[in-house]
Amino acid sequence: MRDGDVVVIGGGYAGVRLAKRLDALARVTLVDRKEVFFHRIASLRAGVRPEWTATPFIPYDRLLRNGRVVVGKAVRIDTAERHVVLATGERLPYDVLVIATGADYPEPARFTGTTTEEAAKSFAGHQQHVAAAEHVLVVGGGPSGVELSAEIRLARPDARVTLAHAGPELLHSTGSTRAGRKARAWLESHDVEVRLDSFMAPGNAFGTYRDAHGDVVDADLSFWATGTTPNTLWLRLAGHGDWLNGAGHVKVDRTLRVEGWTDVFAVGDVNDVSELKITPAALAQADIAAHNIRVHLQSSGRHRKEPRFYRPIRRTPLIVPFGPAAGVTVMPVPGGETAVLGSRTSALAKAKTLLTPYMRRQLGYTAA
C-alpha cells in the first residue's frame, strides 16, 4: 500500500532520482515539459558530433513501475487545496510537492523545445555551424567551457578555437590551480588559444567580440559557458516570488523543505544550497529529500524516524573531460588537500561514455 500523493515537478537528475526512490512508497507523479529525460552531461559532445545526436535522450517510460510521468507545464500551485495546475487545466493533487525544475544552461547544453525531434534538430544545427566555422570562440573557463573547447578542437582540428576566461586561471571553481594548469596545458598543446583575464562582450560589428582591455576578437561562431539561471520564473509568475532569493533560487531549510512549508521541497540546481551545482550534489539532495518525505508521509506510529539534515557538498570528485580519451579529475583527499588525476582515470570514469550507460540503467534501460 502506497501512502500519499507526491508530485515532482521537473524530470532532471534530482527529480528522476527522487521519483524513483519514492515509487514503491507513494503515489508518484513526475511532471516535465520534455517527453524524454535529457542527459545533459552528454550534450556538449552531442552539439559537436553527429554520431552523438541521439545519445542524451532517454525515454521516461521505464522509470516508474507504480507512478506515472506527465508531459506538461506547471503554471500554478494551489497551496490551500494542495493542487498543481498544469497549462492544460489538469489539476494534480499532492500531499507532498517537490520542485526540481533545475536550471537553464547555455547552448549547446540545452534541450530546445519539448520533443526529441526539436532538440535533435537544434543539436544538428550546432554541428553544422561548428563544421563550417573558421574561428570558434568559447567564453567561460569553467568545467563546461573547457570541455566544450576540447570537443570543438577534436571535431575541428583545422579550425581556430579560442577560449576566453574572465578569471586568472581555468577551472577556478574546483579550488585546484593544478587542475587549471593541466587543462590549459592540454588545450594549448592542441592549438587552442587560451585568453585569461579576458572578460568578453559582443562588439559593435557582427562576429566581433571585445574584451575588457579593448582588444577585439573576430569569430564567426561563439558559445557562452558563463553560468546558469534557475528555472523559477514560473514560480514568480504563479505568485510565489517570496519563495525565491535575490538570484532566483528557491530558499530551503536544512531538510530541503521550502522555507515556511512542511509539505513542499526543492532539490537540485533550483534551490539555494551553497555548493557546486553538479550532478553528484543533485543526487545527494534527492536521497535526503526522499528520506524526509518518507518521514513526513509516515509521521505517525511508535517507530517514527527523524528527518535528516542535508550537508552541502564542499568537496567532491569532479571530472572534466577533454574529449573521449583525456581529461582531468580533481579528487578530495583527507586533510583538506586535493589530488589531481590525469587522462587515464578521467577517460575510464567519465570522458569515454559521459556516464551514459549509468543514466540509461537509472531510467530502466540497458547500458548500450
Image: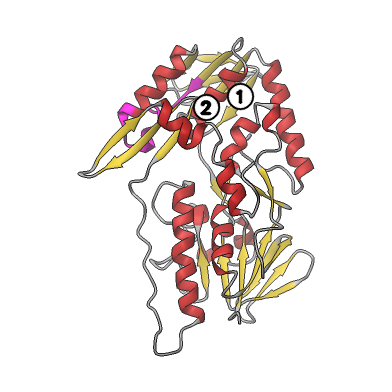
**Circle 1 — which element?**
strand
Question: Can you give x and y, in whole percent of width and height, for residue 30 in the image?
Answer: 65, 64
Query: The C terminus is located in which quarter?
Result: top right
Q: Is 116 on the left-hand or right-hand side of 19?
A: right
Give the residue drawn at x 77%, y 41%. Answer: 118
Is residue 258 visible from the viewing direction of this image?
Answer: no
Above-or-below relation of 54 to 134: below
* Amino acid at dot 1: Ser
Between residue 47 and residue 140, name the one nearer to us: 47
User: Residue 165 magenta-drawn?
Assistant: yes
Q: What element carries label 2?
A: strand
Residue 318 sits inside the magenta stretch:
no
The numbered dot on residue 222 is 1
- Which x, y percent locates residue 13? 56, 52
Write the start and end of the magenta stretch as one range: 163-178
Q: Mark 2 points at which residue?
A: 139
Q: Is residue 154 left or right of residue 31?
A: left
Q: Residue at x 39, y 79 (%)?
A: 305
Amino acid on which disc 2 is placed: Val
Do tag 1 and tag 2 residues touch (Cβ < 8 Å)? yes
Residue appearing at x 65%, y 26% in the figure = 48
Name which of mark 1 and mark 2 comes first in the sequence: 2
